[in-house]
């Protein structure tokens, strides 16, 4: 069946405390009583969103709650009316629950309508978009400081021991060739922060130890973005990077990096007369 004349939708939300009336959207359920059929999609970034809004949770318990509501929604014949959907939503006692059902009119194939609604209401942004956003933020910050014209752009080097390439938006020479790599940690869970930091640290260590045929000795420079509530994670990542010869800066304090870029430009004879940055 490609289209349905009537249906309902509910947002799947995480609400840790009913008394505070605070919740974050983590998924979407669409009910098609005429089929019957229930479409459910969970945000791939659900845990990161929850952690960012409410801090670390009991993820095992959360997975159990998610699985329980998913299993119940798979019984499509139990949701043939709006009243049945609302009754189920009202009787959910866990932190993962549904909002009251709202009517949905289908003007396109069901799957297309579902994808559009999910994007509009939940918007599970792809990782590539987040990477693009943090790179754009770095570009804006360096441009504001007037140093992007002193940097080499779109630098690619190979990590020999890993047999893979690292692509950095900027690089500069200060005795070693520095590859500036921005990374978003603010939307990551503790486990994701550790995974990202470990990968970057290993890459940085290998780059430091293996000179590049063209740029010779290398140094990885991490510019990290953390949420204000992530001070403990920030401290841990700084320690990891220091142990693996990776220089680390934060978006909140780019002054040391900007100073090093400028002083290195003078040392290596790069024109530092203030000129408009290239777009």
Image (tube, grey):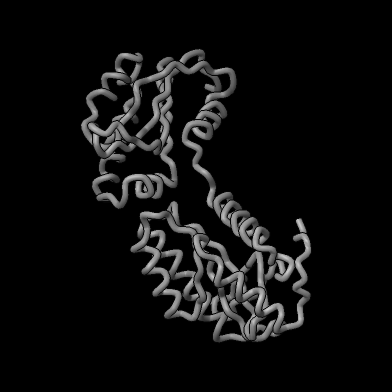
> Looking at the image, is 238 positioned above or below residue 209?
above
> Looking at the image, is 46 positioned above or below residue 137?
above
> Looking at the image, is 38 positioned above or below residue 15?
above
Residue depicted at 55% across the width and 66% down the height: 254
Residue 3's spot in the image, x, y percent? 54, 19
Position of the C terminus by quadrant: bottom right
The image quarter containing residue 147 is: bottom right
Left or right for 92, reference 32? left
The image quarter containing residue 81 is: top left
> Looking at the image, is 99 positioned above or below residue 190?
above
Residue depicted at 37% across the width and 37% down the height: 24
How many labels, in total? 0
Residue 53's spot in the image, x, y percent? 36, 45
Nearer to the camera, 222 or 35:
222
Residue depicted at 41% across the width and 39% down the height: 42
The single residue placed furthest to the front in the displayed view is 274
Residue depicted at 41% across the width and 18% down the height: 102
Residue 202's spot in the image, x, y percent? 48, 76
Residue 26's spot in the image, x, y percent? 39, 38
Nearer to the camera, 47 or 19:
19
Nearer to the camera, 104 or 268:
268
Left or right for 139, reference 97? right
Left or right for 11, reference 254? left
């Amino acid at each position: 069946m490609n289209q349905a004349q009537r249906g309902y939708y509910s947002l799947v939300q995480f609400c840790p405390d009913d008394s505070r009336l605070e919740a974050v959207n983590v998924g979407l359920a669409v009910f098609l009583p005429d089929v019957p059929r229930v479409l459910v999609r969970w945000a791939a970034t659900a845990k990161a969103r929850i952690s960012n809004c409410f801090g670390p949770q009991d993820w095992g318990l959360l997975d159990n709650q998610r699985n329980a509501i998913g299993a119940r929604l798979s019984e499509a014949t139990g949701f043939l009316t709006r009243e049945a959907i609302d009754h189920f939503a009202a009787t959910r006692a866990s932190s993962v629950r549904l909002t009251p059902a709202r009517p949905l009119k289908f003007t396109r194939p069901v799957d297309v309508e579902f994808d559009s609604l999910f994007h509009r209401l939940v918007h599970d942004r792809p990782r590539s978009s987040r990477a693009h956003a943090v790179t754009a933020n770095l570009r804006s910050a360096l441009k504001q400081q007037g140093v992007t014209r002193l940097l080499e752009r779109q630098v690619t080097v190979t990590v020999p021991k890993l047999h893979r390439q690292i692509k950095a938006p900027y690089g500069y020479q200060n005795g070693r060739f520095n590859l500036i790599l921005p990374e978003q940690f603010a939307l990551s869970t503790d486990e994701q922060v550790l995974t990202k930091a470990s990968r970057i640290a290993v890459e940085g260590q290998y780059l430091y130890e293996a000179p590049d045929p063209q740029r010779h000795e290398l140094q990885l420079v991490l510019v990290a973005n953390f949420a204000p509530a992530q001070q403990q994670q920030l401290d841990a990542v700084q320690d990891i990077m220091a142990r693996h010869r990776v220089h680390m800066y934060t978006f909140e304090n780019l002054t040391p990096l900007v100073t090093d870029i400028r002083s290195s430009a003078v040392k290596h004879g790069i024109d530092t007369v203030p000129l408009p940055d290239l777009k």
